[in-house]
Image (cartoon, helix red, strand yellow):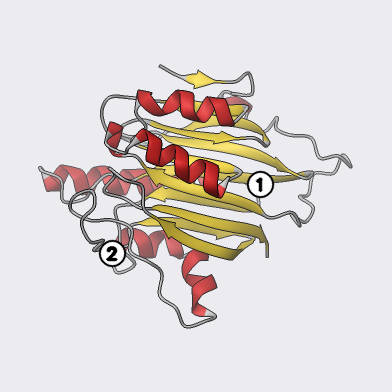
Amino acid sequence: MSCGQSLVEPIVDRARRLNFRDGSTVSPSMDTPIRLMTSNLLHGGADVDAFVEVLDRLKPDVVVTQELGFEYVEVLTERYSNHYLNPAEDFTGRGIATHLEAVFGDIPMPVRMGTSAALDVSGTECNLDGIPLINPIEFPWWTSVKTRSGQLEAIDHWSLTVKEPSIVAGDFNASPKWPAYRHMAEDRTDVVAEHLSESDERPGRTWGWRPGWPRLLRIDHVFGSGVIAIEVSVVPIKGSDHDAVVVDLVTA
């Protein structure tokens, strides 16, 4: 089931995107902050009421979801006029919802597809990619490692098609010490870590073995090119083994 507005575009039409108000082909400055939230919903495990409470309290402009179950579709479509949602009963569910004008698409990746959105932020085109990397130690691990490498190659290939400002957000199943994180950070900025480094703070951990258990690792990230965070937070959602990451972003 795919729940999308008429803004959905085929990958081959990605070049025909939002028209800037001045007709230029170069992105102007994104002076208006946007609040982005990325959240892994544990394929139906996250409590719907708790998810609603977080959305209504924080009012993100854009919501990126991984492991999106069918029970969250109505919640998102009631609050966001533009959306591209692909719910599933397993871990493959995904989607992006926003009240901004947007053009959506799929990012071809092995096992788990990614989701793209070209967002119109006060006349600036901001490119957003929602990413779910598979767990590299999932059995058989030798197959998972190969698949994960293919996913990273797909992200790199896709990134060549977008301009700054751009954002890559999601569940990367990788802490900052893992190779996949270092790979992503080679040409992109971890906007959460960068923002907190100014005050010598450490980013909050986002994942635990079970819902409600202490968070052990930071594996949910927001990477950016041409953007910086001005506010960041990690927000628990009852029933999920992941905390949501919320960032307010402007162009660098």
- Residue 156 in view of the camera: no
Mark sitting on residue 115: none
- Report the amino acid beneath label 1: Cys
Label 1, label 2: how far apart the Cα atoms are: 28 Å
Mark found first going from the N terminus, 1 or 2: 1
In the image, 167: left or right of 40?
right
Spot occupied by residue 116 in the image (x, y as percentages of width and height): 53, 37
Q: Residues within 10 Å of mark 1 (few under 14, many from 20)?
A: many
- Residue 41 in view of the camera: yes
Residue shown at 49% from the left, 65% from the top: 192
Q: Residue 128: name its quadrant.
A: top right
> Is 107 rendered above or below residue 168?
above
Give SS at disc 1: strand
Give SS at disc 2: loop
Direction left: furthest residue = 140
Mark sitting on residue 126: 1
Spot occupied by residue 197 in the image (x, y as percentages of width and height): 49, 78
User: Quick one: 105 or 73, which is closer to the camera?
Assistant: 73
In the image, 111: left or right of 224?
left
> Is 149 rendered above or below residue 68?
below
> Which residue was labeled with disc 2?
178
Residue shown at 29% from the left, 44% from the top: 240
Residue shown at 42% from the left, 59% from the top: 234
Q: Residue 109: name its quadrant.
A: top left
Spot occupied by residue 108 in the image (x, y as percentages of width and height): 42, 33
- Report the amino acid beneath label 2: Trp
Residue shown at 23% from the left, 63% from the top: 216
User: Quick one: 7 or 39, which is closer to the camera?
Assistant: 39
Spot occupied by residue 186 in the image (x, y as percentages of width and height): 46, 65
Direction bottom: furthest residue = 200
Q: In which quarter of the image is the C terminus?
A: bottom right
